[in-house]
Image (spheres, rainbow, N blue to C red):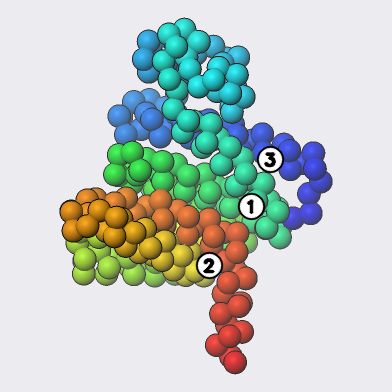
């Protein structure tokens, strides 16, 4: 989209605010706590965080990563997720061709950041994220471009089916949460889910081989979360998927 600097700045602010909310969800949802109330509190002293100490990115920098009340360290994960989401919102806006494509892209990258954060810490990909995300993907495309809905349904079924076969063939390699995540990515990306999965698998293989090389045979028993690699692939699919498919088709035609 052709957006001016103020519009991109607003999107970045929106992304940072969404990233702040994603931090709350990533912390509370695996613990089965409400994501709505109570208001954010320090996990060390349980004191409610004041609004001026809850500004995305800036508050963490001004407080030097510590709670104002008790001085406990605040994980750098919080500003990183806020900054990452802000950057992804701007990147999506610069890559999509229309306003109709913008909202599915923004929702997708938000879901991918959230799922990756939870899987890294808890080794789970919650259905309570994936099920609503699948429904939202189809509803957004139904409004933006109804002709794409069938393609995206097929892509989601194909992507989920492909990972299901892989999960059955190699039970220890990935879980059903990864299978469902691949399907959700297909609902958002359509045919661009193909390069997304390819990138995700390639990254997973490279990192897995690197860990085994560094730690030896003991690394084979170590559980490695796969959703973050799928999420990275999903971001690539969102930003560059169509171009990668066109490039491949051009090469295949000789």
* Above or below: residue 154 compared with residue 67: below
Q: Is residue 192 left or right of residue 126?
A: right
* Residue drawn at x 60%, y 64% as measured from the top left: 240
Q: CA distance from mark 1 to mark 3?
A: 10 Å
Observer-nearest of 202 and 4: 202
Observer-nearest of 34 and 254: 254
Circle nearer the N terminus (1, 3): 3
Circle nearer the N terminus (3, 2): 3
Observer-nearest of 70 and 242: 70
Quarter placement of the N terminus:
bottom right
Q: Which residue is mark 3?
A: 11
Q: Quadrant of residue 34?
A: top left
Q: Which residue is mark 1?
A: 92
Q: CA distance from mark 3 to mark 2?
A: 24 Å
Callout 1 touching callout 3 (CB < 8 Å): no
* Residue drawn at x 58%, y 52% as measured from the top left: 104
């Amino acid at each position: 989209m052709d957006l001016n600097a103020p519009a991109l700045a607003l999107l970045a602010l929106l992304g940072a605010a969404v990233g702040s909310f994603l931090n709350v969800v990533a912390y509370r949802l695996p613990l089965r706590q409400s994501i709505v109330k109570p208001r954010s509190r320090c996990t060390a002293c349980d004191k409610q965080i004041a609004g001026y100490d809850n500004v995305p990115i800036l508050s963490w920098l001004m407080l030097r990563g510590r709670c104002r009340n008790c001085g406990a360290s605040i994980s750098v994960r919080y500003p990183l997720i806020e900054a990452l989401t802000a950057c992804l919102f701007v990147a999506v806006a610069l890559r999509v061709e229309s306003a109709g494509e913008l909202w599915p892209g923004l929702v997708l990258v938000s879901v991918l950041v959230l799922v990756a954060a939870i899987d890294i810490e808890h080794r789970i990909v919650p259905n309570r994220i994936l099920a609503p995300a699948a429904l939202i993907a189809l509803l957004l495309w139904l409004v933006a471009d109804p002709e794409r809905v069938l393609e995206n349904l097929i892509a989601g079924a194909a992507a989920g089916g492909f990972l299901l076969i892989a999960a059955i063939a190699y039970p220890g390699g990935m879980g059903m949460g990864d299978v469902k995540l691949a399907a959700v990515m297909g609902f958002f990306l359509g045919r661009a889910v193909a390069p997304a999965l390819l990138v995700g698998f390639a990254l997973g293989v490279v990192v897995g081989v690197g860990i085994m090389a560094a730690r030896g045979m003991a690394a084979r028993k170590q559980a490695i979360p796969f959703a973050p690699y799928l999420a990275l692939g999903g971001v690539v699919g969102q930003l560059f998927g169509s171009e990668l498919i066109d490039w491949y088709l051009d090469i295949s035609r000789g």
